[in-house]
Image (cartoon, helix red, strand yellow):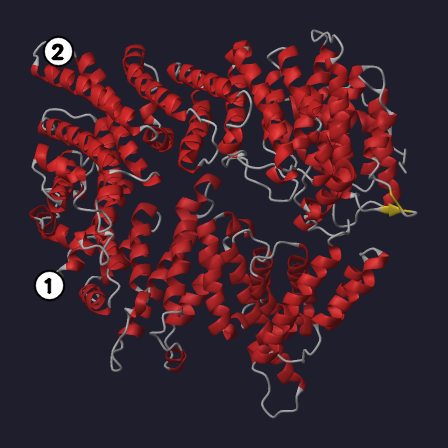
Amino acid sequence: AFSRGFLIQSLAQLENLCKQLYETTDTTTRLQAEKALVEFTNSPDCLSKCQLLLERGSSSYSQLLAATCLTKLVSRTNNPLPLEQRIDIRNYVLNYLATRPKLATFVTQALIQLYARITKLGWFDCQKDDYVFRNAITDVTRFLQVQCIYLIQHIHIYKHTHTLTYTTHPLTKHRKIASSFRDSSLFDIFTLSCNLLKQASGKNLNLNDESQHGLLMQLLKLTHNCLNFDFIGTSTDESSDDLCTVQIPTSWRSAFLDSSTLQLFFDLYHSIPPSFSPLVLSCLVQIASVRRSLFNNAERAKFLSHLVDGVKRILENPQSLSDPNNYHEFCRLLARLKSNYQLGELVKVENYPEVIRLIANFTVTSLQHWEFAPNSVHYLLSLWQRLAASVPYVKATEPHMLETYTPEVTKAYITSRLESVHIILRDGLEDPLEDTGLVQQQLDQLSTIGRCEYEKTCALLVQLFDQSAQSYQELLQSASASPMDVAVQEGRLTWLVYIIGAVIGGRVSFASTDEQDAMDGELVCRVLQLMNLTDSRLAQAGNEKLELAMLSFFEQFRKIYIGDQVQKSSKLYRRLSEVLGLNDETMVLSVFIGKIITNLKYWGRCEPITSKTLQLLNDLSIGYPFLSYVRKLVKLSAVQFMLNNHTSEHFSFLGINNQSNLTDMRCRTTFYTALGRLLMVDLGTRTLVGLVRDLRGIAFAFNAKTSFMMLFEWIYPSYMPILQRAIELWYHDPACTTPVLKLMAELVHNRSQRLQFDVSSPNGILLFRETSKMITMYGNRILTLGEVPKDQVYALKLKGISICFSMLKAALSGSYVNFGVFRLYGDDALDNALQTFIKLLLSIPHSDLLDYPKLSQSYYSLLEVLTQDHMNFIASLEPRVIMYILSSISEGLTALDTMVCTGCCSCLDHIVTYLFKQLSRSTKKRTTPLNQESDRFLHIMQQHPEMIQQMLSTVLNIIIFEDCRNQWSMSRPLLGLILLNEKYFSDLRNSIVNSQPPEKQQAMHLCFENLMEGIERNLLTKNRDRFTQNLSAFRREVNDSMKNSTYGVNSNDMMS
């Protein structure tokens, strides 16, 4: 299979190029070497040269080049290698690995990747009725030698064979291979790895020996990969919360019913060095997460008992947990105890009382050592949060004992955070409070834990708050107080305010009593008193973190105790009345607004506080018109002050000077959105004044025709030239152009039919002229930017283009312009806008259209409108533009975003319908010939039938083989695609039928016959609906037919 006609001189030259590529520091030399090697990989005799490099090459880099080139050769989709050649390469690679145990690690990895690639991509290839690439276990075992190094290499092969993904092949093929691999080979590999681990654990391995050390490490990685396999094709995002279920197939039951499997990993944990333990614990995490339905109740109880016993044994011998990786994985294991099992099941375990005591002690100790592995605390708090949330629902008679241990966990968290403040300030350590995301995550968990035995939580918080508040007040009154002491007390109070807000927010998770509302009142009174103290000092000094904690507290209080759903007789309000004289909700709202105005006055140059303060104002205003408290809000003098004095004199963040950061001015939109809502409550004849972001906030709030037309008539035509001029001057600065474009997009958006002009008014046409002018001006200028760095291309270019697409879509679909008028009277506004759209579109690579979600949604939404109402324009485009658009639709059909996929289906339906109508007209005898655009469009489609055929194949594959979430949308273009490509559809149908096992082919053929039963050759609505009904039945029948077939890619029936 390999040609050997390769000269020794060429071999030396290649090795020299490899050395230059990987070792030289000279950029020019490296680029030249890279160019030469690229030419080599594309040469016709690359295959034979690769074998010669492997056999005679003296450099590891040349061997790496050969392995990499071979991998590319076997992976190519166009002009693939013959089956016999791939078999030869596979066998050659295995022999090469077996006979050369001392290869460089990166060469071994590359060759293993090559073997895995051949195996995976050839999984369904047959030779004499034998699946030649499915005997990976047999092939590899044949080469197992006594030396551990061979075994390690082959374990690598197992590992890579089923984890490999390769993006140039369709996702459906990968799923089909993964499903077959799971059913035919994965369990055998898992069993083999467990057996080898048992043998290893029974021997006294010398882990100082590099080969034995590597053997054990690779065995554990292999086992973990088997347990971490994507069994049902969900492709869970690894960055998401990993408290998920492992969907072990039913055929694996025996391995998990056998307690020795679980015991193996606990024994390994205790018998091997800590450096291996994280992998062992990772395996245990996966085992602990196997789906509940794998067992019946008795089996699950037995399995859980063994699992809890193993956890207890680790807690009783915690020495290895001093390693951060072990500690992290063990915390994950503890979290799985509650994520996968019910509290009622846990309490029935024989050793539950002792285990819950040990877990509580472990948690308390972990929280007290706050500086050790802080990212692992999430899992411990998650465990206790789930346990506490289950208390009201547990029905078991056995005691859960959480009333004893949750207060200990709560106390440990609170006191450890307070004690950390002094150490952090003293030693200059990183403050956890600066990571607001992590703090908020932990507080969300604590909110549930703290509400369990809330009396104890409240008593502790009152005691600690009073101590810190008193010390703080004494320090402020003392002339000799050190700044360090003041900072420590402010840090402690910051934590306490955050925690008080969290436990008040936790009220939503439990049925609250009057006594607990009274406790909330005690805590709220203290925070408000502290706020009065700190606000009185803002002219001299303030603490940013404490202010952010206050805003977090206000947000939690608003969610729970502000609104029509709250009983105003709540004991919280009684306590506020007794202590602070806040007799009702109106007075509490006055405190909210007072705090908002204070923050905007004193913290206007602090973006985090200003942003969160305005968000609080926005949240308070958003209740209109459903919550009566917003009407109370408007009547407050403080709100009236804001409505009448929104200037930089009173609110510094509204000012513009040389020190202002343009990007920080985004908060103005939030401010004016809130003011706009409040203004709507009591709208008079008030003149609306402001800048672009202010106006957009107001425009967004005005959904009624009366209020919006007031705004529109004020802006147009007087101030529209200012917006156009801003785009002309500062097109290159997104901080300026983005707000202007967004305002224009908001003004042309006919939301709630607010843009309704009188019959005699030309304003609709005039508004579109302004829209066209702005799009054209921005588009022509932004295209002059030239090359933009990849990391800045969205911010500098694509974001503005995306807004232009949204603006044009809103204008075209607003139903307030008759677009036929433009061509009739020679007005080029519509043509200019559409031609600019094409220019902007062609400047965007295909990959960017789907890589940036906002861009893809705006583009496909606009394209849907164009194909529906302006198909003559699409038909008049140049062939390369039409092919670009069709390619983008084809790629969008397989997008993960359902909105994009559905939009592509609609676009395709409009195009196919247009084609079918024009084709039908061209075949009939008529006196009126097709117009030039239609005739050219038909000609282009006839020249490139593969594009439409590819989309027919894609749609059909998605419907048959994938989890089609928008089947109705997919069905609409499918009928037109079939009618336009009847011969291709027939070939495609035969191909699908023939790919099934012989016993399934007749059933599949019948499915296709039923699909077209009663379907006529037209695209009338009645015919389409009949086809959609047939398609639903077709999909059900196909899935039923393929359920038990290894040929099907959607076989998730192993759960049955």
Image disc number at residue 684: 1
Q: Identify which amino acid the numbered label 1 is placed on.
A: Gly
Picture quadrant where residue 216 is located: top right
Count of labels in the image: 2
Q: Identify which amino acid the numbered label 2 is placed on.
A: Ala
Q: Please name the residue shown 30% across and 32% down the image.
A: 502
Image disc number at residue 844: none
| 784 or 833, nearer to the observer | 833
SS at badge 2: loop
Residue 281 x/y as whole percent: 59, 22
503 is higher (above) or lower (below) than 875: above
Picture quadrant where residue 369 is located: top left
SS at badge 1: loop
Can residue 113 be seen here? The reply is: yes
Upstream in sequence: badge 2 or badge 1: 2
Residue 551 x/y as whole percent: 23, 35
Residue 102 x/y as whole percent: 79, 16
Location of mark 2 (residue): 481
* 687 sits left or right of 106 in the view: left
- The quarter of the image holding the N terminus is top right
| 398 or 961, nearer to the observer | 398
Work out how far the residue at label 2 is from the one at label 1, CA to CA, in angstroms: 54 Å
925 is higher (above) or lower (below) than 744: below
Q: Tell which residue pokes out farthest to the front in this image.
A: 397
Q: Please name the residue shown 25% across and 39% down the image.
A: 555
Residue 984 x/y as whole percent: 74, 68
